Image (spheres, rainbow, N blue to C red):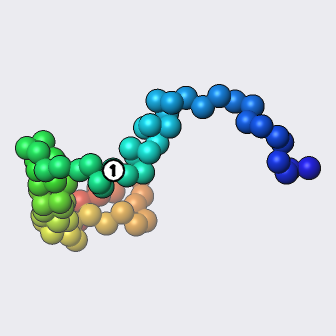
Amino acid sequence: MAGDHGPQVLRTDPGLIKWYHMHMNRYKYFRWTPRTVKLTFWYVFAVPTAMGYLAYKTEGKYNMRVKRRGDTVLEF
């Protein structure tokens, strides 16, 4: 039933195949450019540092459990 159906029915797009191979071998073609250095800095250092700072500063301020109508979210 679900076996081989003979020759390929659909045509393959050469551009799509080229993109697929480039995508699978991306690590071979990577180069450090000013753009990749900036992106790496932001995603590896700046964003986690900012999120950690916000988590540290707001720890214990908010209690989201069992709030009734009219109660405030702030606990400080």
Q: Secondary structure beneath disc 1?
A: helix
Amino acid at circle 1: Arg
Number of marks in the rendered image: 1
Mark 1 crowdedness (10 Å alpha carbons): few <14, some 14-19, many ≥20: few
Left or right of 45? Residue 18 is right
In the image, is 60 to the left or to the right of 25?
left
| Residue 31 position in % (x across, y down) | 17, 49
Q: Position of residue 19 (x, y in %)?
A: 43, 38
**Residue to which mark 1 is pinned:** 26
Q: Relative to the observer, which residue lies in front, 48 or 58? A: 48
Question: Measured along the vertical axis of the image, is residue 14 above or below residue 34?
Answer: above
Q: Is residue 22 left or right of residue 59?
A: right
Image quarter (top left, top right, bottom left or bottom right) of the C terminus: bottom left
Residue 9, how many percent across, how many down? 75, 31
Q: Residue at x 38, y 44 (%)?
A: 22
Question: In this orientation, does residue 76 appear?
Answer: no
